[in-house]
Image (cartoon, helix red, strand yellow):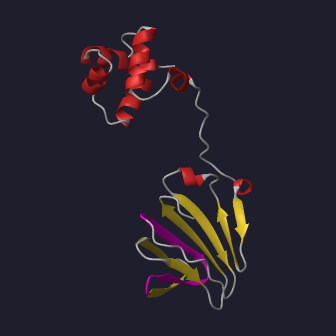
Amino acid sequence: MELGSKIKNLRVAQDLTQEELADRSDLTKGFISQLERDLTSPSVATLVDILAALGTTPAAFFQEEKDEAIVFTSGDQVESVKEDYTISWPVPNAQKNQMEPVVLQLQKGAQTKTEPPFAGEVFGYVEKGKVHLHYGEQTQALKSGDSFYFRAKEAFYLSTKKSEARVLMVSSPPHF
């Protein structure tokens, strides 16, 4: 384990300068600089002080991180079947991330539930069929290959009339 680079990553993630970290842990900026470049090693007591200044514990700092999955198969998907549409989450546990993708499969004459306004953004891409996007008082017709993007300041939902449709939607932050 490269102690210095891990400390630097924690410091940068908290938007702290070397000087700010040094002040918080009663050390010098020069020592922090050398530590981050692995040119020196801290005593156990000094390391505990640095980690406390970074808001973490030795146990959390030295815990081995699992490799985060970056590829998901169809078997990983979670699906919820509604009356006339299906919503699938292709990325399991995406609600802990900054964005959440879902795939909507709508039957003829389907209407999704109305999503209330929220502090975020929504992107959608019509993969197949035709849908109507209802956003506030507006209604827009979209066909295969069309996309939409909006700040979720208004309630919204999707509907179909004469065709089935498949829509990829992404919200940031997670909302679905």
Question: Residue shown at 63%/49% (left/top)?
Answer: 71
Q: Residue furthest top?
A: 43
Q: Main secondary structure of the magenta part?
A: strand
Q: Quadrant of the C terminus?
A: bottom right
Task: Establish if 79 lies above or below 24.
Answer: below
- Image spot of residue 145 (x, y percent): 53, 77
Camera sees residue 37: no
* Residue at x 47%, y 19% (from the top left corner): 2
Compared to 77, does 109 lie above or below?
below
Q: Is residue 56 visible?
A: yes
Q: Is residue 28 above or below residue 158?
A: above
Image point (44%, 16%), residue name: 48
Most extreme residue toward the bottom, as rendered? 162
The span picked out in magenta is 119-137
Magenta segment: does it hold 50? no
- Within the image, what quadrant is residue 162 found in? bottom right
Is 87 drawn above or below residue 134 in the view shown?
Answer: above
35 vs 158, left or right, is left
Q: Quadrant of residue 90?
A: bottom right
Question: In this rendering, would 156 be left or right of 108?
Answer: left
Q: How many marks?
A: 0
Q: Position of residue 172 (x, y in %)?
A: 47, 60
- Locate residue 160, reporting x and y percent: 61, 86
Q: Magenta stretch containing residue 125, yes or no?
A: yes
Residue occupying image coordinates x 65% and y 53%: 92
Q: Horizontal and vertical percent for residue 150?
A: 41, 72
